[in-house]
Image: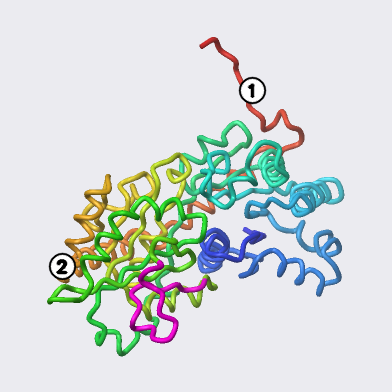
Amino acid sequence: MKILMINTQASGVGYYRTTMPAEALLRAGHDVTYSKSDISFFYDYAERKGGLEKWLLDEAWKHDVVHMGFSTVLSQISTINGALRNYALTAHKHKLPIAADIDDDPLNVPSYNTAFRAYQGGAEEKSALMIQLRTADGVSVTKPSIASSLHRDGKNFAVLPNYTHPPDWIDLPVDPHRDEDKSIRVMFAGGHGHKGDIDTIKDEMIILMNKYDGKEGRPMLRVFWLGCTPDWILPWMEDTLDPLANRSFYLQPCGLNTYHRLLRWVSPDIFIAPVAHNAFNESKSCIKAYDAVTADAAFLCSDWPTYEEVPQDCAFKHSNNMEWKEMLEAMILDPELRKKKAAALKDWTLTTRQIDTHISKWVDFYTNLRESPIVKELSDVIRPRIITEA
């Protein structure tokens, strides 16, 4: 099978939704055209081949299926979903199915998320995304809840979960001086859109930061924030001259190669993943559990559908703030407990969550698209809304 995968995002989304499955498909023997970076590099590649339009007309149509990340840029959608498919069909009598990939629930973005305004009402970004859904021959999603949310505006939904590829991170180096730091390192990784999630543990974290200060024989708690730092942690990161005088640190967002190296090098003892209890977070996947394994850390997360796939014996799952405080405190005080949970999580990841074991799901999705009629008009996709009396 010859597959064209178009990455529209250069972040971790692009890695999990395009780069990793593309390389797994290659290892499985399929012919895949893809870019490790975002769509701008796809355009640059096409320009070197004589221009995007020429490349699409000469080469792209020869693929059996196109799998494109979600986009809020209408020109990208019209070029791929419209021009390419129509050209393949009219000029070459070649049915070329176009699939969209959605890794979030755009209809339930919470107000604290930085993308909230982009997906409200008639916002241009939302309109572009809905056009992509309605012109796609199939839609891949990470969780069943996303398919349930979007089912009226798309067809041929397939759940393709996020998996991991251990060779990308398992042998990366660890700071040789890591053991010299006797403090307990806690890490949160996530962009500004997670501010509302972080704030759910504000009071408990402040209590524990005050209590575990390294004095009178107590452990010292240090927290590392990658991508987003809450304002309430600032009292522990005010020294601009002596980093070791601080107990809170901000790490800049970075590419995936650097990100994995950073997780291994910093080697936090505990990786935390709080989420606010809302519909949007039900659609989020368990990639933070993979991050914890990369860091060789114990994992503390919210007991919410986000992490329903992670077995109870592999993580600490809290259902309320009191449990959060008690579980984090237990991990701070018990290194053997941390090691036991971290080992169980790693074993689960390595034995059940490697993408090469699951790549047949992608192949089945593409096979189904090739065997299904392509979208020719809105009635091929849109489900009617039925009005009923309350």
Q: Which of the two marks, 1 or 2, is nearer to us in this view?
A: 2
**Rendering coords of residue 143 (x, y %):** 46, 45
Say which mark, if any, is on residue 191.
none
Indicate yes or no whether the magenta region holds residue 236: yes
Number of numbered discs on residues: 2
Q: Residues within 10 Å of mark 2 (few under 14, many from 20)?
A: some
Farthest residue, direction bottom: 176
Q: Residue at x 72, y 66 (%)?
A: 40
Farthest residue, direction left: 217
Which is more toward the observer, 146 or 34? Answer: 146
Q: Residue at x 73, y 52 (%)?
A: 73
Amino acid type of the residue that numbered disc 1 sits on in the rendered structure = Pro
Asked whether residue 313 is in view, the answer is: yes
Q: Does residue 135 appear left or right of residue 236 in this picture?
A: right
Which is more toward the observer, 322 or 163? Answer: 322
Farthest residue, direction top: 389
Q: Residue at x 34, y 70 (%)?
A: 223
Q: Looking at the picture, does residue 215 appear above or below residue 189?
A: below
Distance between the alpha carbons at the discs numbered 1 and 2: 56 Å
Amino acid type of the residue that numbered disc 2 sits on in the rendered structure = Leu
Please report the bounds of the magenta region as a residue range: 234-252
Tell me the quarter of the picture where residue 225 sits: bottom left
Q: Does residue 88 appear left or right of residue 162 in this picture?
A: right
Tell me the quarter of the picture where residue 139 sits: top right
User: Which structural element holds mark 2?
Assistant: helix
User: Which structural element holds mark 1?
Assistant: loop
**Rendering coords of residue 220 (x, y %):** 23, 74
Say which mark, if any, is on residue 384.
1
Q: Which residue is mark 2?
A: 333
Q: Does residue 153 appear left or right of residue 269 in this picture?
A: right
Which circle's residue, 1 or 2, is located before the other in the chain? 2
**Rendering coords of residue 348 (x, y %):** 29, 60
